[in-house]
Every structure is written in C-alpha cells, then in structure tokens.
C-alpha cells in the first residue's frame, strides 16, 4: 500500500434509519463501460477545497437527490480508507437522509438503486459488486452487527 493515495474517493452506506436500520442502499453503475452493471456505494471524488465529509454530502445530493447526515465511518485498512487501485482510496460513512425521507432519485450515474435488507446479508453479498467495494460491504455488515 502506498503511503498516500493521490485521489480521495468518498462513499455512503445510506441507511433507512439511524437508530434501527433494516436496510442499506446500493447503486448500480451506469459507466464507465468496464464497471457498468456492477454495484457500489454512492459517492465520488473529493474536491481540493472540501473535506471528505463535505464531499460526501455534496455527492449524495448530486447523485441521489438526498441530503444526508453522516453517522460513523466504516474504517478501512489505510489512513485514507479502502484502497481502490494504486492511486485511489475510498473513505465510507454510514449516513441517513437528513430530512428523514431516504427515497433516492435515480440519476444518470446509476442504472438502478436497491435497498438491501440487513436481515439477509447473503442478498447483499450475492450482488455483483465492484471488486474493491466487496470488502467494504463485509466491513459494513460487521459494523452494523456490532
């Protein structure tokens, strides 16, 4: 692992409820073609003038039309979170809709969004995830159980 990754990516594990979550949201990539149809955590790249937390709030508003309140970070093995490739790492937070209404809007970034029930972790793990996101799914499920 490099000492520092050049690109910082952020992702949200959007929960249906802050106190007693029963599901989290996954999004199916529309592009690039190599990732089309694979599932991921919604999010995107941090801009130079913003914190990771600000970037994630912005990305959720842009991608899903949802204002979010961040809860806890799902810590990765690196100071910058979860390695995605040699030049990028992703920090992931659990989050809830700030207004209490967690209905995302399907934008151009995704083909579909789906609520995955926490009571059936196998359903989440059976989806074809972007390979770098799959360890985060396992960590998220552990985080929410603990």
Image (tube, rainbow, N blue to C red):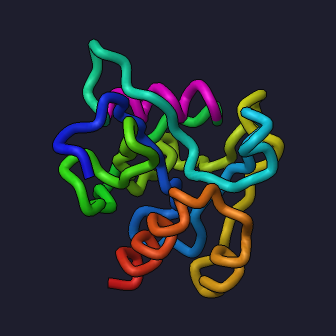
> Picture quarter containing residue 2?
top left
Residue 57 counted in the magenta span:
yes
Report x, y in % for residue 61. 55, 29
Position of residue 82 relative to residue 136, above or below, is: above
Position of residue 19 relative to residue 60, above or below, is: below
Q: Quadrant of the C terminus?
A: bottom left
Position of residue 76 relative to residue 90, above or below, is: below
> What predominant SS class does the magenta segment belong to?
helix
> Picture quarter containing residue 46?
top left
| Residue in the image at 57% along x and 75% along y | 22
Is residue 111 left or right of 78 when viewed as pictured?
right
Is residue 130 left or right of 7 when viewed as pictured?
right
In magenta, the rendered stretch is: 53-63
Q: Nearer the viewer, residue 124 or 134?
A: 134
Report x, y in % for residue 117. 65, 76
| Residue in the image at 77% along x and 28% along y | 108
Residue 146 counted in the magenta span:
no
| Residue in the image at 18% along x and 50% along y | 79
Report x, y in % for residue 142. 39, 80
Is residue 38 left or right of 81 when viewed as pictured?
right
| Residue in the image at 50% along x and 63% along y | 17
Q: Nearer the viewer, residue 66 or 2?
A: 2
């Amino acid at each position: 692992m490099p000492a520092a990754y050049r690109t910082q990516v952020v992702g949200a594990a959007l929960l249906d409820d802050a106190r007693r979550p029963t599901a989290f949201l996954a999004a199916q990539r529309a592009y690039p073609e190599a990732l089309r149809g694979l599932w991921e955590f919604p999010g995107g790249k941090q801009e130079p003038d913003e914190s990771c937390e600000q970037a994630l709030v912005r990305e959720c508003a842009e991608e899903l039309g949802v204002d979010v309140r961040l809860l806890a970070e799902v810590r990765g093995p690196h100071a910058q979170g979860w390695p995605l490739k040699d030049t990028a790492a992703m920090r992931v937070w659990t989050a809830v809709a700030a207004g209490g209404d967690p209905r995302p809007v399907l934008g151009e970034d995704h083909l579909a969004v789906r609520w995955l029930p926490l009571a059936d972790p196998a359903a989440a793990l059976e989806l074809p995830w972007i390979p770098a996101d799959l360890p985060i799914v396992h960590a998220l499920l552990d985080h929410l159980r603990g």
